[in-house]
Amino acid sequence: MKPTIFMGIEDILLHDETIFKNINAFDPDYLPESYKYRDSQMEALAICIRPALKKGRPINVVVLGSCATGKTTAIKKIFDMVEHNSEKVVCCYINCQLHTTRFGIFSQIYQRVFGHFPPETGVPFSRIYQKIMQHLVSEEKALVVALDDVNYLFHSKNANKIFYDILRAHEVFPGARTGVFAILSDIEFRFALDKNVNSIFIPQDVIFQPYAREEIYSILKERTSLGFYPEVISDEILDEIVERTSESGDLRVGIDLLRVCGNLAESEASRTIENKHLDEALKRTGPASLAHTLNSLSDLENSLLELIINFKDENLTAGSLYELFKKDTGTSYSSFNRTLDKLEFLRLIDTKFTGKGMRGNSRLIILRFSQDEINKCMVQP
Ligand SMILES: Nc1ncnc2c1ncn2[C@@H]1O[C@H](COP(=O)(O)OP(=O)(O)O)[C@@H](O)[C@H]1O
Ligand SMILES: [Mg+2]
């Protein structure tokens, strides 16, 4: 007889029963068939691609919205639709976290245009570039390049060159019709983008606002019925997950919780997700995203957040916060406003208009997390 430990592991590997109908439904890059609440954004993107279908140039776009608001999904869906309906537009999606060099990015474009990658060595960039553009012109095809998480190109200082390569192709290759969809998760970079690529890129903005609680509920509910067999998860547990997701403002928190809960239940051979699984999943995924956000703050953002945390009165207005902030840091009003917008964008605070005062000075500032929660994250490494 085999030692029991091996049987245990074999059991885990070969156990047939699963609560997952489709475990991929909880993957970060899962492309859901049904994609709600983004009709107006999809429409705006379609309007920008439309000229390319009619022998014109695509309109350049900045897609702006915080994490997990569906930006990547929208681009992938619209690109799929375009390619199914026309041979005359090449759509190329590029994840700038993975591809940051001119050569790397144009290799991806080359692959979309010719169906295979260029040789990795021996061919200079200019040859690859020329081949792409000549082919597009002679085939009368337009090119739309989506640069997802484009801020990564700022680190390598390649953004300007790459935008220039794509957008000014028509100067060297008359008839070339090219456009860029730049996708940003951080409102701060909206200014950096202008600075980095200045006059060559004059885009249309398409904004993805955060999902409301009911929208989060409906998206997660649908995801559970795609990913789990019926009755694996109760309404109560789903509600709790929706609550946590809505607090974090990040839909991915909810999708991760569903996956981790499912794995924990399955590892105990439980046919349903129980409260204890959710508790454990929260421990594993919970404050990480808040901690991550807090760790990514600049010094200025940190000082402003600290002022807000330490302010004891409930009625903190933007005007009085600015007075305090100016005393501490000497910052200008517009820089203060930008920093405040950033904290709101990251969903660390809410601001509420009271209808009084000038220039939004009477906005009430509301912390979205308790001081305890924030302190807990601050001490984490
Ligand atoms: N409207 C929606 N309907 C269904 N799923 C959505 C929707 N919006 C976002 N998601 C899901 O949320 C996750 C994050 O979406 P994603 O497009 O990657 O966001 P972003 O690129 O803005 O960070 C993905 O799993 C995606 O399938
Ligand atoms: Mg994305």
Image (cartoon, grey):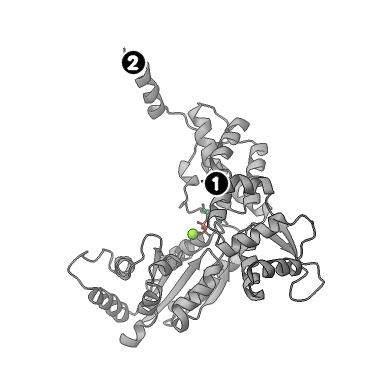
Residue drawn 34% across and 80% down? Answer: 140
Judge by depth and name the residue closer to the eye, 314 or 253: 314
Tell me the residue that label 2 is attached to: 3
Task: Residue at 27%, 68% (x, y): give it.
Answer: 114
Residue 254's spot in the image, x, y percent? 58, 46
Name the amino acid, label 1: Ala
Q: Residue at x 38, y 25 (%)?
A: 9
Q: Residues within 10 Å of mark 2 (few under 14, many from 20)?
A: few
Q: Is mark 1 within 8 Å of ligand 1?
A: no
Q: Is residue 375 above or below residue 304?
A: above
Taking depth in this image into account, of 113 and 120 the one nearest to the observer is 120
Residue at horizontal 17%, vertical 68%? Answer: 122
User: Where does the image place residue 192, in percent across and percent down from the top left?
Assistant: 50, 73
Q: Amino acid at mark 2?
A: Pro
Q: Is residue 150 left or right of residue 44?
A: left
Circles 1 and 2: CB atoms closer than 8 Å: no
Indicate the position of residue 163 as horizontal and vertical percent values: 40, 76
- Identify the secondary structure beneath mark 1: helix
Rendering quarter of residue 118: bottom left
Q: Residue lying furthest top in this view?
A: 1
Q: Quadrant of the N terminus?
A: top left
**Res 144 → quadrant:** bottom left
Task: For label 1, count other residues whose C-alpha is less than 10 Å away and answer few (under 14), some (14-19) or many (20+).
Answer: some
Is there any visible trace of residue 231 in the rendered image?
Answer: no
In the displayed structure image, the side of residue 90 where residue 261 appears, left or right: right
CA separation, marks 1 and 2?
39 Å
Query: Could you tell me residue 110's position as x and y percent?
Result: 29, 69
Does 340 sit left or right of 95 as displayed?
A: right
Question: To which residue does mark 1 refer?
Answer: 288
Q: Nearer the viewer, residue 295 or 135?
A: 295
